[in-house]
């Protein structure tokens, strides 16, 4: 049963982590990967953009209302297949549940986005962007969801909540074969949805991202990045990394200055992980020499998992921004121009980069 519990704790990440899903949104999907039987089954199901955004908005709004009310049962059911509460009743009877009630279990399983939320409330401002998922994402999302449906069906087919043997469920789940869940999925369509959210107390706004899954004529939510609570925590981590990048760039510039190879940086320039996005580089400044030095102090400078830029002026670092390609929605920046960082909070990396490009170009 530990495998079941681990899967439920991970919620939407049971088989396909959100990292691998969001990699596809960032254009980093791996080519040449062998297709599983699940991918073969779901190919061709990605729909055209004929979705109903009103229904999507109502679903997301209902989810956030439930989140604000700390209605753990409703947020759990909105992410899971119909009948999942029967599975939870069985899980609660296992030794691994350690006497916890169903209510306690479903609350614990959703710690991924309730953690550190305290009494925070979120205002749903509306949908900003909706994209149909690609075939790889569709396969991963369907497979993850279908695993839970397999458990629902197993309980129903083996005596129901009262009749099923929890240890038999555990044994069967541990020995599950991919072909057992590779048939037609009840997930018929899926979309990557960017929404505008607000902090109910401060009035600040930021972006959240969801996957919405078409299921039996309605929608289910993949909510690992439901909100800004999770995103803000990641943004805090990325801001710290941006500070490290900023300081590494400062040391690198100081070394170039000492070596007499800094050049004239008085007009301001941008050096990026993507050299095609360097801007305003004077002839007497060697960007590759700078990148090499930077890598000595910021190990991720050449990593494919990071996209970054620094603004340089008068021989000093003025600003640094970075994001992890696994989650391009969260950009770290340093320093904060305002005391609370509100000028950049909620802005994407590209928006921040464009802002600094405009400043350099006048």
Image (cartoon, rainbow, N blue to C red):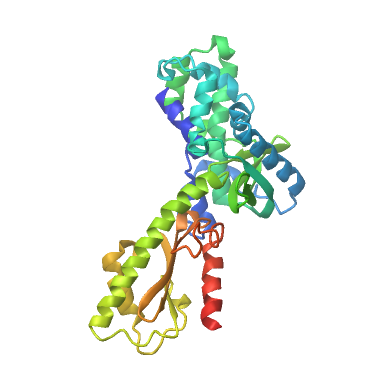
From what the image shows, is residue 358 above or below residue 56? below
Coordinates of residue 85 in the picture (x, y in percent) = 59, 22
From what the image shows, is residue 67 above or below residue 355? above
From what the image shows, is residue 294 above or below residue 137? below
* Image quadrant in which you'd find residue 342: bottom right
- Give whichever of 241, 211 is nearer the camera: 241
Q: Can you name the residue that lies furthest to the front here?
A: 339
* Image quadrant in which you'd find residue 63: top right
Q: Can you name the residue that lies furthest to the top here?
A: 163
Coordinates of residue 303 in the picture (x, y in percent) = 36, 63
- Give whichever of 166, 288 is nearer the camera: 288
- Give whichever of 310, 177 is nearer the camera: 310
Q: Quadrant of the C terminus?
A: bottom right
Q: In which quarter of the image is the N terminus?
A: top left
Q: What residue is at 50 percent from the left and 49 percent from the top? A: 232
Note whether residue 51 is visible.
Answer: yes
Q: Can you name the residue that lies furthest to the bottom here?
A: 283
Q: What residue is at 48 percent from the left and 14 percent from the top? A: 93
Q: How many labels does the image show?
A: 0
Q: What residue is at 66 percent from the left and 45 percent from the top? A: 123
Note whether residue 35 is visible.
Answer: no
Coordinates of residue 154 in the picture (x, y in percent) = 55, 21
Coordinates of residue 209 in the picture (x, y in percent) = 59, 49
């Amino acid at each position: 049963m530990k495998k079941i519990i681990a899967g439920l704790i991970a919620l939407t990440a049971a088989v396909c982590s959100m990292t691998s899903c969001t990699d596809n949104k960032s254009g980093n999907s791996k080519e040449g990967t062998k297709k599983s039987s699940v991918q073969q089954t779901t190919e061709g199901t990605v729909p055209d953009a004929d979705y109903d955004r009103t229904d999507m908005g109502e679903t997301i709004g209902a989810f956030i209302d439930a989140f604000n009310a700390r209605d753990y049962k409703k947020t759990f059911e909105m992410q899971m297949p119909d009948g999942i509460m029967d599975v939870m009743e069985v899980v609660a009877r296992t030794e691994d549940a350690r006497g916890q009630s169903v209510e306690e279990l479903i609350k614990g399983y959703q710690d991924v986005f309730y953690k550190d939320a305290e009494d925070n409330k979120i205002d749903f401002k509306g949908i900003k962007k909706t994209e149909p998922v690609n075939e790889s994402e569709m396969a991963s999302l369907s497979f993850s969801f279908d695993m839970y449906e397999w458990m629902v069906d197993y309980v129903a087919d083996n005596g129901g909540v009262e009749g099923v043997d929890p240890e038999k469920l555990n044994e069967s789940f541990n020995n599950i074969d991919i072909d057992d869940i590779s048939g037609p999925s009840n997930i018929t369509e899926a979309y990557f949805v960017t929404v505008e959210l607000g902090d109910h107390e401060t009035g600040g706004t930021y972006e959240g991202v969801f996957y919405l899954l078409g299921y039996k004529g309605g929608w289910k939510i993949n909510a690992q990045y439901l909100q800004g609570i999770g995103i803000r925590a990641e943004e805090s981590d990325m801001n710290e990394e941006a500070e490290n990048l900023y300081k590494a760039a400062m040391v690198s510039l100081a070394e170039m200055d000492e070596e007499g190879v800094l050049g004239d940086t008085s007009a301001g320039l941008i050096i990026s992980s993507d050299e095609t996005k360097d801007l305003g580089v004077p002839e007497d400044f060697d960007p590759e020499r700078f990148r090499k030095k930077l890598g000595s102090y910021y190990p991720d400078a050449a990593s494919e998992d990071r996209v970054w830029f620094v603004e340089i002026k008068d021989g000093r670092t003025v600003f640094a921004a970075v994001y992890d390609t696994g989650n391009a929605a969260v950009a770290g920046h340093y320093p904060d121009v305002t005391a609370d960082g509100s000028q950049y909070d909620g802005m994407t990396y590209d928006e921040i980069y464009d802002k600094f490009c405009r400043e350099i170009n006048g």
